[in-house]
C-alpha cells in the first residue's frame, strides 16, 4: 500500500479520472472543486468508473476499497495540507491558473510537487512569480488518464531536475507511463503530433479527397492498428529490411514531396459545418455521451488484452 497523498483540484472528467488513477494505485486522494455541485457528484461517478474497470478485470481490489481512498474537500487549504503532489485540472485560462498556483505555493509543503494537467499552456506562463516555482511542472494526461496511461512531464526553465525525477517516480508508482519533454513547447508532444495528423486529415477532407468516414477508417483499420502497440519510429524501422536508414533512402524523398504540396487546414466554418453534418448523420448529438462510454469500454478491453502481454513484448 502506498503512503503517498495526492490532492486533485477540479472534479470534472479529467479530475475524476486522475482520482481513479491514484486511488487504484493505493494513494490517499483528496478531491477539491470550487463548484460544490460538481464535487457532490464526484464520488458516485468515480465509483461507476471503478466498477467498469472491475468488469474488465483491470483492478485487483474490491470497488469500495478503492473508492474509500478518495475524500472530497470544500476548502482548498484542507485538500492540499501535507500532500506529496497536487494535480490541477482547472480551466485553460492563464490568469486563473496563475492565481491558483500562487495559492498552492503558499498552502503546501515546500517539497510538494505542483503539477498542471493543462493541454497546451507551458508552466512558465503561470508559475514565474512563485517563490516555489522550481517545484512546478506540467503533467499532461490523455483523456481519460484512468484508461490511457501516458503522462507528459514538462518543466519550466526554472523547474529542477529533481522535481521532474520525483514526479516521474510518483506517476510510475501510480501505474502511468510518464515521458519527459526536455524543454517547453506549446501543446507538448502528444497534441503536436495529433495536431499534424488532424490538420492533414481535415485538409484532405476539405479538399474533397475522401469522406470523413473513410478517413476515420484509414486510421482505425490502418495506421491505428500498428500504432496501438508501437510508435512511428519503430514502425518505420520495421517497414524496411535495413531499418530506419533503409526506410529513409526508399521513402524520404516521397515524404518531402508531400510536405511541399501540403495545404494547412484553415478551420473554415464551412468545412467544419460540413464535417459536423456528416458526423451527426452517423451519431446524433444526444448520443455522443453514450458513444464516449462505448469508447471507454473499448479502451478497457484493449488494456485487458495488454495486461496479458509481458513488458518484453513492448
Image: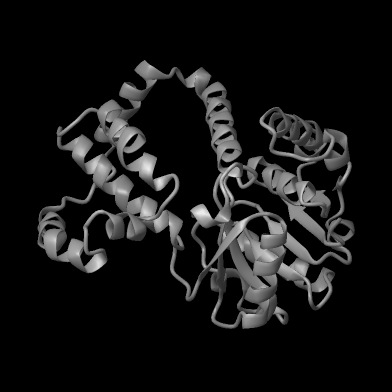
Residue 274 shows in this picture: no
- Observer-nearest of 44 and 265: 44
In the image, 267: left or right of 67? left
Say which residue appears at 87% left-offset and 46% top-offset.
69
* Colour treatment of the image: one colour
Residue 263 shows in this picture: yes
Q: Quadrant of the N terminus?
A: bottom right
In the image, 240: left or right of 146? left
Give x and y (percent) for residue 40.
Answer: 82, 35
- Observer-nearest of 172 and 140: 172
In the image, 148: left or right of 79? left
Residue 225, relative to residue 184: is it above or below?
A: above
Give x and y (percent) for residue 85.
Answer: 76, 64
Residue 181, relative to residue 312: is it above or below?
A: below
Residue 3, relative to residue 265: is it above or below?
A: below
- Observer-nearest of 93 and 227: 227
Say which residue appears at 71% left-offset and 48% top-offset.
21
Give x and y (percent) for residue 197.
Answer: 31, 48
Q: How many marks are shown on the rendered structure?
A: 0
Say which residue appears at 72% left-offset and 79% top-offset.
132
Say which residue appears at 65% left-offset and 52% top-offset.
90
Give x and y (percent) for residue 292.
Answer: 54, 29
- Observer-nearest of 199 and 75: 199
Residue 5 lies in quadrant: bottom right
Amino acid at each position: 500500500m502506498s503512503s503517498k497523498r495526492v490532492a486533485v483540484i477540479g472534479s470534472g472528467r479529467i479530475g475524476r479520472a486522475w482520482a481513479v488513477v491514484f486511488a487504484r494505485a493505493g494513494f490517499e486522494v483528496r478531491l477539491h472543486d470550487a463548484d460544490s455541485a460538481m464535487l457532490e457528484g464526484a464520488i458516485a461517478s468515480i465509483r461507476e468508473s471503478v466498477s467498469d474497470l472491475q468488469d474488465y478485470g483491470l483492478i485487483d481490489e474490491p470497488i469500495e476499497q478503492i473508492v474509500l481512498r478518495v475524500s472530497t474537500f470544500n476548502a482548498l487549504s484542507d485538500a492540499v495540507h501535507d500532500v506529496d503532489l497536487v494535480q490541477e485540472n482547472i480551466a485553460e485560462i492563464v490568469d486563473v491558473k496563475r492565481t491558483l498556483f500562487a495559492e498552492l505555493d503558499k498552502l503546501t509543503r515546500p517539497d510538494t510537487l505542483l503539477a498542471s494537467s493543462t493541454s497546451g499552456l507551458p508552466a512558465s506562463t503561470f508559475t514565474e512569480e512563485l517563490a516555489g516555482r522550481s517545484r512546478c511542472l506540467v503533467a499532461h494526461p490523455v483523456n481519460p488518464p484512468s484508461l490511457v496511461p501516458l503522462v507528459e512531464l514538462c518543466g519550466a526553465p526554472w523547474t529542477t531536475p529533481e522535481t521532474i525525477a520525483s514526479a516521474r517516480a510518483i506517476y510510475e508508482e501510480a501505474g502511468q507511463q510518464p515521458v519527459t519533454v526536455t524543454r517547453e513547447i506549446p501543446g507538448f508532444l502528444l497534441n503536436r503530433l495529433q495536431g499534424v495528423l488532424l490538420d492533414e486529415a481535415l485538409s484532405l477532407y476539405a479538399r474533397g479527397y475522401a469522406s470523413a468516414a473513410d478517413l476515420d477508417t484509414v486510421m482505425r483499420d490502418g495506421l491505428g492498428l500498428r500504432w496501438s502497440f508501437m510508435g512511428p519510429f519503430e514502425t518505420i524501422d520495421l517497414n524496411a529490411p535495413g531499418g530506419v536508414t533503409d526506410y529513409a533512402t526508399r521513402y524520404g524523398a516521397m515524404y518531402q514531396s508531400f510536405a511541399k504540396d501540403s495545404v494547412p487546414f484553415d478551420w473554415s466554418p464551412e468545412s467544419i459545418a460540413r464535417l459536423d453534418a456528416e458526423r451527426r448523420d452517423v451519431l446524433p448529438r444526444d448520443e455522443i455521451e453514450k458513444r464516449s462510454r462505448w469508447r471507454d469500454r473499448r479502451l478497457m478491453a484493449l488494456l485487458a488484452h495488454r495486461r496479458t502481454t509481458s513488458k518484453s513484448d513492448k
